[in-house]
Image (spheres, helix red, strand yellow):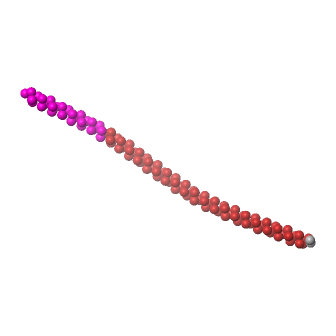
Amino acid sequence: MSRSHEFEQKLAQQQNKFGQVEGDLQRVNQDKNFVASQTDQLKQQSEQQQRQIADMTRHMSMVTQQNFELSNELQQFLQTDEVLQNKLNRRSTLDEIKQKVDCAI
């Protein structure tokens, strides 16, 4: 083999390797772009979920406050109901005593 033929053969091998490296580089860039795209999508999803969590936390706080207020209102209603029942029981007792007195007279 002549020296020029060896040189051409080595040049062809190097060009082939260079083509493979360029192909690998292209695939790596595609992968990098895909990963960047996926990362952006995941970031957007995460931000959306964070907003949903914040919204749900505010809603939960509002419902908790409403529950507290309703519990207080119910407690006041129960106290008022108890007072009214005691008054009615006294009035009923007074009416019974009055009837006994009237019957005795």
Q: Which portion, as a residue range, is magenta? A: 77-105
User: The N terminus appears in which quarter of the rendering?
Assistant: bottom right
**Residue 50 position (above or below residue 79):** below
Q: Report which quarter residue 43 is drawn in.
A: bottom right
On the image, the x and y values in percent for residue 38 come to 60, 59
Main SS category, magenta section? helix
x 35%, y 41%: residue: 72
On the image, the x and y values in percent for residue 37 come to 61, 61
Q: Report which quarter residue 81 is drawn in.
A: top left
**Residue 91 position (above or below residue 34):** above
On the image, the x and y values in percent for residue 91 come to 18, 34
On the image, the x and y values in percent for residue 48 come to 52, 56
77 relative to 98 in the view: left or right:
right
User: The C terminus appears in which quarter of the rendering?
Assistant: top left
| Residue farthest to the right, as pictured | 2
For the residue pair 51 and 11, the one nearer the viewer reads as: 11
| Residue farthest to the top, as pictured | 104
x 88%, y 70%: residue: 7
Q: Reply yes or no: does residue 88 show up in magenta.
A: yes
**Residue 24 position (above or below residue 67):** below
Q: How many marks?
A: 0
x 20%, y 32%: residue: 90
43 relative to 12 in the view: left or right:
left
**Residue 54 position (above or below residue 85):** below
58 relative to 4 in the view: left or right:
left
